[in-house]
Image (cartoon, rainbow, N blue to C red):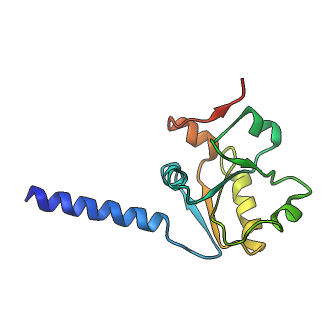
Amino acid sequence: MKKLINIIVIFIIALSFQSCFEKKDGVINKVSVQQAEEMIAVEKVRVIDVRTKSEFTSKHIKNAVNIEVENDDLNSYLDTMDKSEPLLVYCNKGGQSARCARILQDKGFTLIYDMKGGITKWEESGRQVIVKN
């Protein structure tokens, strides 16, 4: 009986990982901090911090790149990117990243993941950030 329960638990975990990485083309996929961390760990996404340069410089998630959603050059920068590359966007709490995710969707990007709660939720959950000293 215990063996059967273990098999069922493993099966459920496997299904949750599959749904986390399931392609939903052209749809903005809201993901939890835990799902984002799992995606980053297996290098399935490009991590984009959409906050201002000074906010990014003060702290950010490891290996994130800074693409300011408020930048006048945002559209021209996005035009140089691969639209099929999976992108994980985040900001402070979720507002700016939701806006950026809609812009990405309008520009034809197909794999967009918006981290719920932003870097604030990431830090509150005890996950590490890169901090400028």
Vertical relation: 121 (above or below) 131: below
Give the residue at the far right of this rendering.
Answer: 72
Asked which quadrant contains residue 7, the reply is: bottom left
Decide which of 95, 115 is in the foreground and name it. 115
Decide which of 63, 11 is in the foreground and name it. 63
Position of the C terminus, as image quadrant, is top right
Give the residue at the far left of this rendering.
Answer: 1
Position of the N terminus, as image quadrant, is bottom left
Q: Residue at image x 85%, y 52%? A: 70
Q: Residue at image x 56%, y 60%? A: 44
Q: Residue at image x 81%, y 36%? A: 54
Q: Residue at image x 66%, y 73%? A: 110
Asked which quadrant contains residue 79, the reply is: bottom right
Image coords of residue 121 (percent x, y): 57, 42
Asked which quadrant contains residue 104, the reply is: bottom right
Image coords of residue 8 (percent x, y): 22, 63
Q: In this view, does 98 lie to the left or right of 25?
A: right
Image coords of residue 90 (percent x, y): 66, 51
Give the residue at the far top of this rendering.
Answer: 133
Vertical relation: 7 (above or below) 32: below
Q: In this view, does 69 lie to the left or right of 17?
A: right
Image coords of residue 53 (percent x, y): 82, 41
The tally of labels here is 0
Q: In this view, does 67 lie to the left or right of 64?
A: right
